[in-house]
Amino acid sequence: MGHPRKYHKTYSTPRHPWQAEKLAFESELVKTYGLRNKREVWTAENILRKYRRAARRLLAESAAKGELAGHTKDEADQIIARLQRYGVLKSDTNLDAILSLEIGDILERRLQTQVYRQGLVHSMRQARQFITHGHVAISGRRTSVPSYIVSKEEEMLIDYYKNSPLSHEMHPERPTRVQEGDSILDKEA
């Protein structure tokens, strides 16, 4: 297992790394989500693989026994609750929904993606830069990890860090937010 203070590998490399369609798919994910390298794709695949493996094991146990009961039911409820808390699964779902998840569902919950989707930055790359430079906070606490998985409760608490120069409305790197009803055409008329 290793020493708890040492970093551990959180991904596993593909068995066949030189398949053209796999390379194209991973490259497209890296571009779409502004990832640093393919290791971040492999980490997300590993997270997804862990939940799918647990769901398949629990479904196999339920098929053998007829229905989940006791410890296995508690474990299934905990997995579903965790994925619902992170916003990966919708409410009122079962273990079968875990098997239909895709890697994009995991990558959408990253802090980097959420900062971009909320309109705090111009691009995914800029979201990564702002996070690593300490300009982004979740409920007032500075967060400098772009791969942080954001829960549904924390999603609306993402904002600029209070001591950051970007927290001022007139900073040139902040994207302008268009308010409803206030447009250039209304001001000219």
Image: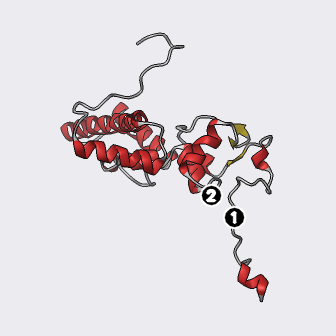
Q: Residue furthest top?
A: 3
Q: Which residue is rendered at x = 31% and y = 29% of the image?
A: 13
Q: In the image shown, does 157 or 82 lie closer to the viewer? A: 157
Under mark 1, the amino acid is Arg
Q: Residue furthest left?
A: 64
The answer to whether residue 151 shows anywhere in this view is no
Under mark 2, the amino acid is Gly
Q: Quadrant of the C terminus?
A: bottom right
Contact (CB < 8 A) between labels 1 and 2?
A: yes
**Which secondary structure lies at badge 2?**
loop
Q: Residue furthest front?
A: 172
* Residue 91 image-quadrant placement: bottom left
Q: Residue furthest bottom?
A: 189
Q: How many marks?
A: 2
> Mark 1 = which residue?
177
For residue 169, side relative to residue 129 (left or right): right
How many angstroms separate mark 1 from mark 2 (CA)? 8 Å
Q: Which mark is residue 8?
A: none
* Residue 181 image-quadrant placement: bottom right
Q: Which residue is rendered at x = 31% and y = 47% of the image?
A: 25
